[in-house]
Image (cartoon, rainbow, N blue to C red):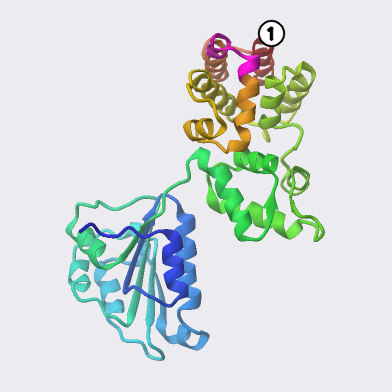
Amino acid sequence: MAKQEFTYDQILSDLQRKNYSPVYFLMGEEPYYIDVISDYIQKNVLDETEKEFDLTVLYGKDVADISIVINAAKRYPMMGTYQVLIVKEAQLIKDWDNLVHYLSNPLKSTILVFCYKYGTPDKRKKWFQEINKIATVYESVKLRDYEVGSWITKYCRSRNVQIEEKAVAMLSEFLGTDLNKLVNEVDKLILTKPSEAHSITPELIEKNIGISKDFNVFELQVALVNKDVLKANRIVRYFAENKKANPMVLTLSQLFKFFSDLMIYHYLSDKSQGAVASELRINPYFVKDYQKAAQSFGAWKTMNIISWIRETDARYKGIDNPSTDEGELLKELVFKILH
């Protein structure tokens, strides 16, 4: 029978119901969920008096040998039912093999938490196979680009706040997949949102985060689709004057993704909203942008645009371009797309 895979929601639900595991092994490229789970255990399993005696936090860089962790895990609680032992930066520990002896008979009064960030151990190792049998093992994976928007919406819903679709797009494009950064910025927006406001708006983002609601990659994309020459050129000029806030690499990356997806859209047999959203892995709200873009740019033109974006990227990196600056390069690219 295959070992059950634990989800983040399931682990938190079990913790809230005080259904504890003797060992937690939290690993993966995305540190956010690892921190949330370990912080919950650290703050909530013991009361304040018990924490003084029965909470221990170790750091991988200070653990010369796994035996230090094992000896600490074998101690009995002094004040309550449990002792909590949290090992942060566990990825820095070198010698794991001896952990097998503790795993064969873990102390039920110890809650041992390993925080193994920015990767996973060799899952073929005997110690990991043993920990996988008896522990709550959770792998925290990085969000993919296309998952960011739905994650933001879900997070806002968990905080009982609505967010407008354009606001979601702005945050997705400018903050990327770093969940800690996303959470910090969304929490900032929630705190600064006027009490009478019902949702997070592009105007609120512009005021508190510094992302322009009118001059950003998303709006440039809309201007191109609508063949709005004046608006597109205004945005390009703004980008040229504010290079640090609007890096060329981000602009080209977003345009390349959009037109690559548009090429796929052209050849989809089923162009219904659900089918397009599933195939392109986008929020259904944005399907209308591809429907409109397909009317503005045929498949042949789209293929040429993709080629021009690649050429612009190469020239931006100095290939066959001794002097043209990025503002002029983007202006030239936009001209080709619109004409």
Query: Which part of the image, by quadrant, shows the C terminus?
Result: top right
The answer to whether residue 31 is magenta is no
Q: Residue 109 occupies which quadrant of the picture?
A: bottom left
The answer to which of 167 and 82 lies nearer the viewer is 167
Measuring from the top left, give residue 50's x and y in whole percent: 46, 87
Q: Is residue 203 left or right of residue 275?
A: right
Q: Provide the residue designation for mark 1.
A: 339
The answer to which of 182 and 201 lies nearer the viewer is 201
Query: Which part of the image, by quadrant, shows the N terminus?
Result: bottom left
Identify which residue is drawn at 76% across, 57% down. Answer: 192
**Is disc 1 placed on a helix, strand or loop?**
loop
Q: Considering only vertical position in the picture, is 159 above or below 81? A: above
The answer to whether residue 297 is magenta is yes
The answer to which of 122 and 196 lies nearer the viewer is 196
Q: Which stretch did the figure color magenta?
A: 294-303
Q: Main secondary structure of the magenta part?
A: helix
Measuring from the top left, give residue 296's x and y in whole percent: 65, 15
Identify which residue is drawn at 66% across, 60% down. Answer: 160
Q: Is residue 140 left or right of residue 171?
A: left
Q: Considering only vertical position in the picture, is 326 above or below 43? A: above
Q: Residue 175 occupies which quadrant of the picture?
A: top right
Q: How many labels were placed on the picture? A: 1
Q: Is residue 310 left or right of residue 246?
A: left
Amino acid type of the residue tagged 1 in the rendering: His
Measuring from the top left, give residue 281's x and y in whole percent: 50, 35
Q: Is residue 128 left or right of residue 111?
A: left
Q: Considering only vertical position in the picture, is 149 above or below 301? A: below
Which class describes the residues within 10 Å of circle 1: few (<14), some (14-19), or many (20+)?
few
Q: Considering only vertical position in the picture, is 196 above or below 313? A: below
